[in-house]
Amino acid sequence: MKYFIKVVLAESYKQHRNYFNNKMIYVSLFLWPLLSFLASYYSYKAFDLEESAISYINSGNILVFLLIGYMAMSFFRSVVQSAWRFSSERQSGTLEYIYLSPASRLAVLMGNALSSVFESSVVMLVFGILMIFYNRESLHANVVGLVVVMPIYVIMALLWGVFINACFLYSRDTDFLFTILEEPMEIFSGVKVPVMIFPGWAKLLSCIFPLTYALEALRQVTLNNSDLGTIKITVLISILIIVVLLAATLITIHIVEKHVRKTGNIILF
Amino acid sequence: MIEIKNLQKVYDVKRRQSFFHMTREKVVAVKDISMRIDKGQIVGLLGINGAGKTTTIKMLTTLIEPTNGTYSFDGIDAIANPDLVKRQINMIAGGERMIYWRLTAYENLWYYGQLYGIDNTLLKKRIEKLLQIVGLEDKADLPVETYSKGMKQRLQIARGLINDPKYIFLDEPTIGLDAVVTQDLHKEIRSLAKDQGKGILLTSHYLSEVEELCDYIYLVNKGELVIEGTKKELTDYVFARNRYVFSVRGMDKKIVCRLRDNLRMIDPESEVLFEDGSCTIISKAELSSAIAEFALKEKLVINELHKQEPSLEQAVIKLSKNLERKDTQIA
Ligand SMILES: Nc1ncnc2c1ncn2[C@@H]1O[C@H](COP(=O)(O)OP(=O)(O)OP(=O)(O)O)[C@@H](O)[C@H]1O
Ligand SMILES: [Mg+2]
C-alpha cells in the first residue's frame, strides 16, 4: 500500500513537472471552457426561464447551474486530455520503462489522472467557486448532501480518467476515443442543457456518461436543496458506476499488459 | 544465473492490402535462441540489423512474452513470474529517449526510483552516488533537455542502475557516442560486472566493443544462433584462416587465376577473391611466402601484400553469409 501511494505521488509529480511547468498552460486550459461557458450563459439570456420545464432553474440561478456544469465538466474532460498526453509516453519510450518496473500499473494511471484532474481544472474551479460565492443568494443548497456527494464525484472523475488512460494504453489506435468522448460528453451529459428536456434517444446516450449523474446530483443538492433521500437513486447509480469503472480498469490493465507482451507494441507509435 | 532455452518469438503482423482488406502474416523475430548469463559475466549478443537482438533482450526483460521456449531466472520461471524478475533487472538502451527531458537528472532518477518502491533515504543516497559515478553531479538540477547526447546517455546508465539490479541488459548502449565517452562507459560496464558481480548482456553493432568487453559471445542471425564461444574460441574458429591482401601492378583476371591455381596446390580450400584491382586471399595455411614467390616467379611488381588482423566483424559477416547460403540452398 505504501508502495502504491509512492507510485501515485511520484507519477503525479512527474506529470506536473513534465506538462505543467509553464504557468501559461493553466490559463490556456481555462480559456476555452470559459468562452464556452459565457456563450451558453448569454444564450440563456435570450429566453424566458421562468417558464422553463425544469423546476429548479430560473433566471436567478442559471449562472450557478451552468457554472456547476462547467466545473464538473472540466474535471471529467481533463482526464481525457491526460490520457492523450500519457499516450505520448509511448513515443518518448518512457512508457516502456514504466512497464519494465514492477510498479502497479493502476497506481501509475491514478497518479497521472490525479495530477491532470486537479491541474487542468484548477483555474476553472477557482473561477467557478468565486462566481458562485458572488452569486450565493441564488444557491439553495443542502450542505449534508453536498458534503457526501462531492467526494463521490471526485473519485468518479478520477476513475473515469484512469479507465480512459488504460484504454489508451491498449494501442495507439485507441486515440479515436478522444474524439468520441470529448464533445459528446459535453453535449449529452447536460452541461449546458438539462438532460431532462432531451428527447428519448438523447437521454439514452446521456446514460452512458458518468458525468450525467454527477451533474444531476450536484445540481440537485446545490440548487434544489435536495437531501440524500431525494437523490438516492442517482447516488446509488453513481456508486455502481464507480465499482464498474474500477473493475473495468483492472481488467483493461490486465488485457493491455497481455496484449503488449504479445505484440511488443509498447514502443510502436 | 539466467538460462534461456530455445526461445522463440513470432509476431502476428497485419498487413494492409487495401482499405478493407488486411492480411495477417507471421514474422519470426527470434527463431531459436538458447543462452546463459552468469553473475559477474559480460555476455555479448552480436548480429546485424534485424537479427533479433532487441527482441531477445525484450524477452529477457519480460517486456514481451516468448512464443516458445523456457526462461529460468535464478531458478525462477521468468515467463510465469515476470514481476519477481522485474525487481532484479534493468535495461539500458542507447539513444536519447526514455528519459523525461523537462525533468532534471535528479528528478528523473527519483521518479524511476519511486517506481521500484525504493525507500526514500536509501534512494537519495543512491541517486547521489550514481550521479557521481556518471559524472553528472554538477548538472543534476538542470533539465535534461539542456544536456548533450553523451550526458543523456550517461543519465540512462544511472537510471538503469537505480534499482541496483542483479542483471543488466544493455541494448547498444554506446550508439552515437564518441570514443572518449565510449571508453568511460566501457570502464563502467566492466566494473559493474567485475567489481559488483552483476550479470550483463550487451548487444552491439560495434564489434570492437564486444571484443573488448565480453567474456562470452553469442552471434545471431535471422533469429538463430550462428555460433557461440569465448572471444578466443570464436577468433580461433573463424581465424584458423589467414587473410591476405595482395595487389600487383597491372593486376588482371589472368594473374588472379594463375595465383589461385598456384595456391590451391598448397591449400585446396583457399579462396582468392578479386575486387577493385586487388586480391583478398583466405586460407587455413600460412601463405605469405607462397604469394611472394608467385610474384617473383611471374616478375610482378608488388603494390601491396599484407596480412590482415583477424576481426570479429569479418567473422560476423562471413558466418552470416554462410548461414544464408545454407538457407537458400535448403529453400
Ligand atoms: N513489435 C514487432 N512487431 C513485428 N515485428 C517485429 C517487432 N519487433 C521486431 N520485429 C521484427 O523482428 C525482427 C528482429 O528485430 P529486432 O529489433 O530484434 O532486431 P535487432 O537485432 O535488434 O536489429 P537492430 O540491430 O536493427 O536493432 C525484425 O525483422 C523486425 O522487423
Ligand atoms: Mg535492436
Image (cartoon, rainbow, N blue to C red):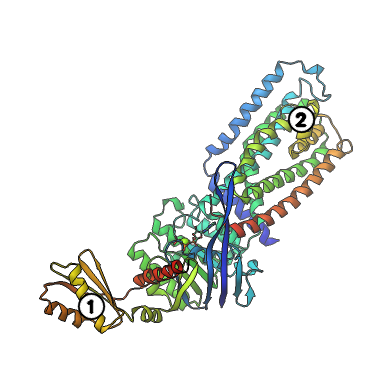
Above or below for A83 versus A8: above
Given residues B47 and B152, the one toward you in this image is: B47
Q: Which residue is mark 1?
A: B261
Between the C-alphas of marks 1 and 2, the distance is: 90 Å
Q: Which residue is mark 2?
A: A202
Q: Are marks 1 and 2 on the same chain?
A: no
- Quadrant containing the N terminus of chain A in the rendered view: bottom right
Residue B73 in view of the camera: yes
> Looking at the image, is mark 1 or mark 2 nearer the viewer?
1
Given residues B315 and B154, the one toward you in this image is: B315
Residue A32 lies in quadrant:
top right
Q: Secondary structure at mark 2?
A: helix
Q: Are marks 1 and 2 in contact (CB under 8 Å)?
A: no
- In screen coordinates, is B164 left or right of A195? left
How would you rate the neighbour count of disc 1 (Cα within 10 Å): few for under 14, some for 14-19, many for 20 or more?
Answer: some
Above or below for A56 versus B8: above
- Residue name at image x 48 percent, y 51 percent: B101
Q: Secondary structure at mark 1?
A: helix
Residue A231 lies in quadrant:
top right
Given residues A266 and B126, the one toward you in this image is: A266
Residue B65 lies in quadrant:
bottom right
- Residue name at image x 40 percent, y 74 percent: B213
How would you rate the neighbour count of disc 2 (Cα within 10 Å): few for under 14, some for 14-19, many for 20 or more?
Answer: some
Residue type beneath disc 2 = Ala
- Report the number of numbered marks: 2
Q: Write down the chain letter for disc 1.
A: B
